[in-house]
Image (cartoon, rainbow, N blue to C red):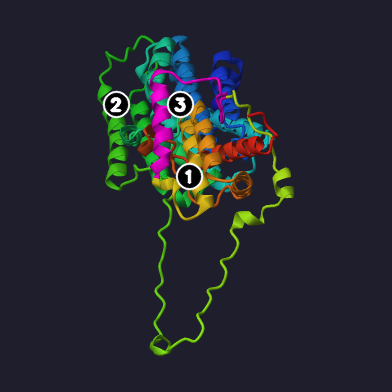
Amino acid sequence: MNAFNEHVGISLRLHFRNKMALLYGYLFPLIFLAAFWVLYRYDKVPLLRHMGELLTVSVLGGACFGLPSTLVSERERGVWRRYRLAPVPTWSVVLSTIVARYVILLSAGLLQLGVALAVGMTMPAYPVDLFVAFTAVSFAFIGLGLVIAMMADSVPAVQALGQCIFLPMLIIGGVAVQLASLPAWAQHVSAFFPGRYAVEALQASVTGGGLGAARFSLLALVLTGAAGCVAGAKLFRWDAQQRFLASAGKAWIVPVLAAWLAVGGLAEWRGRIAIATDAAEPAIKVTVPSVNVAAEIRVMVEPIKPPPPPPAPWEKITAQDIAGLDYRVPPDGGVVSPIAPEDDLPEDQTKDEVEGVRNGLVDWPMGKTADDIQNVRYLLCVAAVPDAIQVPVERYLPRVVYNYLIDRYPKEKLTKILTWIVLHPEDGAAVDNISDLGINGAAGDPSIVRERSYLYAIKFIGRLTGRFEP
């Protein structure tokens, strides 16, 4: 046990002396955190909806780059050959290395969580569940890191192998790009990457229903980690002269691939691929009143006057409500909620798409419901969805929507409707794609569409009231 503790301490001290390990373990995740904060700085709670992704990146960097880089570097310098000569069981040396790496990953995760809390994020909903999920994610990727370390013959080979796994997992594995923003085929492919389940388990502990809602993800992570650790132990090499291609145990890579395939196949079989989006507009329940036969046959001397309809919700909006809105929104020329000026005319394909939307709005059924507030919500989505999926036409459609709204509604009524929507951003229904208007792609995450709709509603109110320049 003393040897185990001593080796854990030595591994930690060596880690903090290694500049490359510090880069992958601490600086790299913080760069991602800063990038996410810039991209999503207009979220109501900064970074809260993205902590699953950020913590997964932190574990990926430390386990798939930091761990194998350290192991291969020490193997090249002959450190592990000396460990083999020590009167210490092999399992103790390997296990102490894994424990030391877990401590490093945990410190990096706590650092990232602390920085997120410092910039305004609220506490996770289930802190204990988050710790358990983080441990499972670390176990899964430490196993993967061991496999990379055993396959790589040099530190540059670690970088190459790590990138082959890291980049696909970031882009189509649900780590850096939200799954709901990916096409259907990529969502199916992501089921075979452990990064998807890492994000799901962590995010469920931060904003979801806890680990009770992420049991499958935990199972997938444990299975992936166990396969990686077993394969890493069977492929373990003490000496740099032992080359991977010349080793006799290369077949132990098969269980690792089999675990990934089994998890993806089970997810497909259980129907866990589809990403939930905002629910469609609820169906209207029609209740047919019972008929009073006596009343039907009785001759009415005076017609019964129906009661006056109740006032629409937007009619309760006052001038004080409008003046009290928070008009601090991103600039029209920024990345979030852009609006092109009147003299900025689209060209080529973008022009055709703009004209297609302008002409399509006239007969668009989503903008012709019986509820004026819901109509305007849907029309705001026409501006919000392209902004969320970041297509070239995003700068021009807000102007189309704004002109359509002021042509359809009186100025005072439109201002009050938009104010009601700003004050009740979570009410009503939203759409995550406007493909029926010729704009392909789905935002996926309904909260992003609602957020961008909120920003455009503020900008439109500012124009209607003269607060903003048109």
Q: Is residue 343 visible?
A: yes
Q: Earlier in the sequence, mark 1 or mark 3?
A: 1
Q: CA distance from mark 2 to mark 1?
A: 51 Å
Looking at the rendered structure, the kind of residue marked 3 is Val
* Residue 343 to residue 130: above or below: above
Residue corresponding to mark 3 = 393
| Region rendered in magenta | 335-364
Q: Nearer the viewer, mark 2 or mark 1?
A: 1
**Disc 1 element:** helix
Residue at x-position 36% and y-position 39%:
436
Mark carried by residue 253: 2
Q: Earlier in the sequence, mark 2 or mark 3?
A: 2
Residue 74 in the image: above or below residue 315:
above
Q: Is residue 205 magenta?
A: no
- Amino acid type at circle 2 is Ile
Within-10-Å neighbours for mark 2: few <14, some 14–19, many 20+: some
Amino acid beneath label 1: Tyr
Q: Which mark is residue 378?
A: 1
How far apart are the alpha carbons under marks 1 and 3? Answer: 18 Å
